[in-house]
Image (spheres, rainbow, N blue to C red):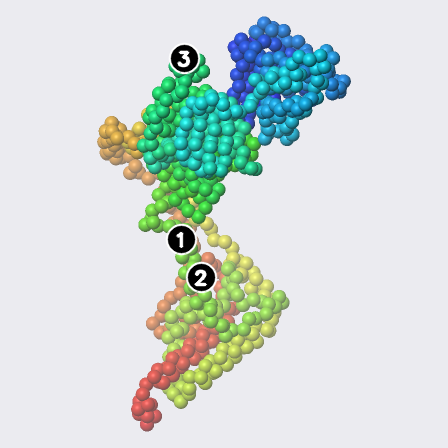
């Protein structure tokens, strides 16, 4: 058995059970905090004692180290006991004994100190244990001792204070209260600024918390001293260090991640963000001997410190907290720096893609590890195509949206996400071909905007329709009468009676005859009338025509005529024979194939390499990637030469193919279809209006016109003769209407002439 791993185990950290993952190997015990990602490692050689004990709701593992430190892990099942005992026996040569606890509930007993742990014993069993590293202060009274503890912000309930009553020693000797305090204080985590500081940095600009602070670095903690607030931060609370270049290239961010955070009232600061100028330098000497530096810092720190302030600060902090300094990896943005300008909520800042996560500075600072990310999403920015949003969704459901990112950063950021194997939420959607198309050339103002053009065209159409139908119509709406026949012709109706407007558009001859008749009447009546009277006359005539039209429709036709009409219309409505489909020409297998272009030749040779570099890439992403790579190919002579050679061979093959008679003879299927089409066209005939030298209203009436949808047959001739009366009526009405219009136009011309011309005409 090489190792054991438990994914749902909790570790006791400052009185709170913190979930994480526990892994036991032959060399160490490793616990990874699932919330902060912090890794705690215990070497197998440091383990002194291992116990299996009962915790609240589950079983726990108690690991006691040679240094006196105590580590407890909970969340094990009863079935895990044998597995763990066997592993400790075989791998660490330690017996895992079960530790019994006192459940009497007594509040008196004796305190025993073992290493950095104080246990309260009732009888022969332990009631509870307190790691002295959680104690922040120990104060004494006459007969009592008060223990104060560090507050854990993540715990729902925190133990803040404990008071112990100690009886006085009547037999003399050392005071029991003072002896108890002496046992606690060396192991307690009490921050006291004693001794000289290792390094002091004056007036450092701090963005979070905001202000200028003097930073004093001691061996176990560092202090931020400002005008209003002071912070003492233990070195054990430092989780990570980041050194990030500013986008302007002149400044540097130094970020310190803290767990637990520092507090200012109700505000928690999980990050310290310091800002340095690159050209700012400092120089000082550490007040420790070389031997002390080697002993305490293992050669990580030299006595003389000089150089840029940010480098000296990062070196001192790295040596003191024993943590690596994280810098941006290989990512380079559009500006040539690792910083991507964006906004988070209402504040502008910079997003830095790192090798194992993203970090945003500075308000508020956010660090997202890759293992926390469920998916990322590229979305359009609101109201603008010059930018886009980058959304990061974590596994616990929190979505961080970084907005207003310049679209030039898209390709680089998308490639970075793909290389890190992060899941892109909107990849492979059917409504978008590729993400590059969403932002390609969208900022060119001279390029045509299809959406804007369509909106303008629709607006023009609405205006045109509004102008045509804007005036009030003189016609009165007719009520629908289901018992009567409609005067609107159906699509396949044989006896179509056209309306006045259709007749005016369809027949030119009717216009001429109506205009001539109107001009004769105008000469005798219209000269002495005014324009107002003529409008009234026109309205009366139109009303009269409508009235006559209604009266002519009221008498019903006999049943026989209706039946004959229906039979003729049904026969006429038979659909015409559809044209035969054009059969697709048979493909000639001997015809040479078209040659490939230089790009296609290059793609055929490079496709497998792209698939190998990007496993699981889709077809669309592969083509997009290939297009980008083809743009960067400088030397294309090889592919262009191959394409030219293929084209020449194709032209030569085509000449030989045409010379041998290939493609000259039409396939038999096409000739047959042509013959069938000719026969069908000869059988079908379409009536069209014919023009005569002397057009008459009856012969050239618009009723004679038949659309292409109507196919004449011998059986429909009787129906057309029965509808001739209606056609003649329609043409006469049309003539009267044109006559009235002609009268009105000539009256307007007469009114515009001078009075002298009227006098001469009357004489």
Of residue 213 and residue 576, the one placed in the foreground of this image is: 213
Mark 2 → mark 1, Cα distance in angstroms: 16 Å
Residue 236 shows in the view: yes
Q: Is mark 1 on a helix, strand or loop?
A: helix
Q: Earlier in the sequence, mark 2 or mark 1?
A: 1
| Farthest front residue in view | 172
Q: Where on the picture, by quarter, is residue 103?
A: top right
Drawn side of residue 660 relative to residue 449, left or right: left
Residue 547 lies, in percent from the top left, at 55, 77
As displayed, is residue 349 above or below residue 68? below
Q: Residue at x 65, y 30 (%)?
A: 157
Judging by the rendered image, the residue that carries numbered circle 3 is 291
Most foreground residue, 411 or 326: 326
Which of label 2 and label 3 is nearer to you? 3
Q: Is residue 433 visible?
A: no
Q: Is residue 737 above or below residue 283?
A: below
Dot 1 and dot 3 residues touching (CB under 8 Å): no
Q: What element carries label 3?
A: helix
- Left or right of 169? Residue 198 is left
- Residue identifier under label 2: 462
Return the mark for residue 452: 1
For the C terminus, the quadrant is bottom left
Report the residue at 42% width, 47% height from top.
384
Labelled disc at residue 436: none
Across and down, in percent, residue 639 comes to 26, 29
Q: Residues within 10 Å of mark 2 (few under 14, many from 20)?
A: few
Locate residue 190: give its quadrant. top right
Q: How crowded is mark 1: few (under 14 residues within 10 Å), some or many (20 or more)?
A: few
Classed neighbour count for the residue bearing mark 3: other residues with Cα under 10 Å, few (<14), some (14–19), many (≥20): few
Which numbered disc, 1 or 3, marks the residue closer to the eye? Answer: 3
């Amino acid at each position: 058995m090489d190792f054991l791993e438990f994914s749902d185990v909790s570790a006791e950290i400052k009185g709170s059970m913190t979930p994480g993952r526990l892994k036991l190997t032959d060399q160490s015990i490793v616990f990874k905090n699932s919330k902060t990602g912090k890794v705690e490692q215990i070497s197998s050689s440091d383990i002194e004692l291992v116990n299996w004990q009962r915790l609240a709701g589950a079983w726990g593992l108690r690991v006691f180290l040679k240094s006196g430190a105590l580590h407890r892990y909970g969340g094990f099942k009863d079935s895990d006991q044998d597995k763990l005992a066997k592993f400790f026996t075989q791998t660490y040569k330690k017996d895992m004994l079960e530790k019994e606890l006192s459940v009497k509930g007594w509040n008196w007993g004796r305190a025993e100190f073992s290493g950095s742990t104080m246990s309260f014993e009732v009888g022969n069993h332990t009631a509870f244990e307190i790691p002295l590293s959680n104690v922040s202060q120990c104060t004494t009274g006459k007969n009592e001792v008060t223990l104060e503890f560090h507050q854990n912000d993540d715990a729902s309930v925190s133990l803040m204070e404990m008071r112990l009553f100690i009886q006085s020693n009547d037999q003399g000797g050392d005071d029991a209260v003072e002896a108890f305090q002496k046992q606690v204080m060396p192991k307690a985590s009490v921050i006291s600024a004693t001794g000289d500081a290792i390094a002091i940095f004056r007036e450092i600009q701090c963005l979070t918390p905001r202000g200028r602070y003097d930073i004093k670095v001691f061996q176990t903690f560092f202090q931020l001293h400002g005008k209003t607030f002071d912070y003492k931060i233990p070195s054990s609370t430092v989780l990570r260090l980041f050194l990030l270049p500013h986008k302007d290239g002149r400044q540097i961010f130094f970020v310190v991640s803290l767990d637990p955070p520092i507090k200012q009232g109700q505000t928690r600061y999980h990050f310290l963000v310091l800002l340095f100028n690159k050209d700012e330098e400092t120089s000082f000497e550490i007040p420790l001997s070389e031997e002390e530096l080697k002993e305490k810092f293992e050669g990580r720190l030299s006595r003389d410190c000089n150089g840029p302030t940010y480098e000296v600060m990062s070196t001192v902090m790295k040596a003191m907290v024993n943590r690596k300094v994280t810098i941006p990896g290989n990512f380079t943005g559009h500006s040539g720096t690792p910083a991507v300008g964006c906004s988070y909520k209402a504040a502008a800042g910079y997003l830095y893609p790192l090798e194992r996560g993203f970090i945003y500075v500075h308000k508020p600072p956010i660090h997202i590890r890759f293992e926390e990310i469920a998916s990322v999403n590229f979305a359009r920015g609101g109201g603008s195509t010059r930018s886009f949003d980058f959304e990061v969704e974590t596994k616990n459901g929190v979505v961080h949206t970084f907005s207003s990112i310049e679209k030039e950063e898209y390709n680089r950021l998308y490639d970075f996400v793909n290389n890190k194997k992060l899941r892109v939420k909107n990849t492979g959607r059917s409504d978008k071909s590729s993400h590059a198309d969403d932002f390609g050339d969208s900022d060119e103002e001279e390029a045509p905007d299809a959406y804007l053009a369509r909106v303008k065209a629709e607006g023009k159409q609405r205006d045109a329709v509004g102008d045509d139908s804007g005036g009030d119509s003189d016609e009165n709406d007719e009520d629908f009468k289901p018992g009567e026949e409609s005067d609107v012709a159906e699509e396949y109706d044989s006896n179509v009676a056209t309306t006045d407007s259709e007749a005016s558009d369809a027949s030119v001859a009717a216009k001429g005859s109506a205009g001539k008749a109107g001009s004769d009447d105008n000469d005798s009546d219209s000269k002495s009338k005014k324009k107002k009277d003529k409008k009234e006359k026109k309205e009366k005539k139109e009303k009269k025509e409508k009235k006559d039209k209604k009266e002519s429709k009221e008498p019903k036709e006999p049943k026989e005529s209706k039946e004959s009409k229906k039979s003729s219309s049904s026969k006429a409505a038979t659909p015409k024979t559809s044209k035969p489909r054009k059969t697709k020409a048979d493909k000639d297998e001997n015809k040479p194939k078209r040659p490939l272009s230089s790009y296609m030749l290059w793609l055929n040779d490079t496709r497998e390499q792209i698939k190998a570099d990007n496993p699981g890439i889709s077809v669309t992403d592969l083509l997009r990637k290939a297009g980008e790579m083809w743009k960067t190919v400088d030397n294309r002579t090889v592919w262009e030469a191959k394409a030219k050679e293929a084209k020449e061979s194709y032209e030569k093959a085509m000449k030989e193919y045409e010379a041998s008679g290939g493609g000259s003879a039409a396939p038999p299927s096409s000739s047959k279809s042509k013959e069938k089409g000719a026969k069908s066209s000869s059988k079908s005939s379409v009536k069209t209006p014919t023009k005569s030298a002397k057009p008459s209203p009856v012969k050239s009436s618009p009723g004679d016109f038949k659309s292409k949808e109507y196919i004449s047959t011998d059986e429909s001739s009787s129906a057309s003769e029965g509808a001739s009366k209606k056609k003649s009526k329609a043409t006469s009405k049309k003539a009267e209407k044109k006559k009235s219009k002609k009268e009105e136009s000539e009256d307007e011309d007469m009114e515009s002439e001078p009075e002298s011309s009227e006098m001469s005409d009357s004489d």
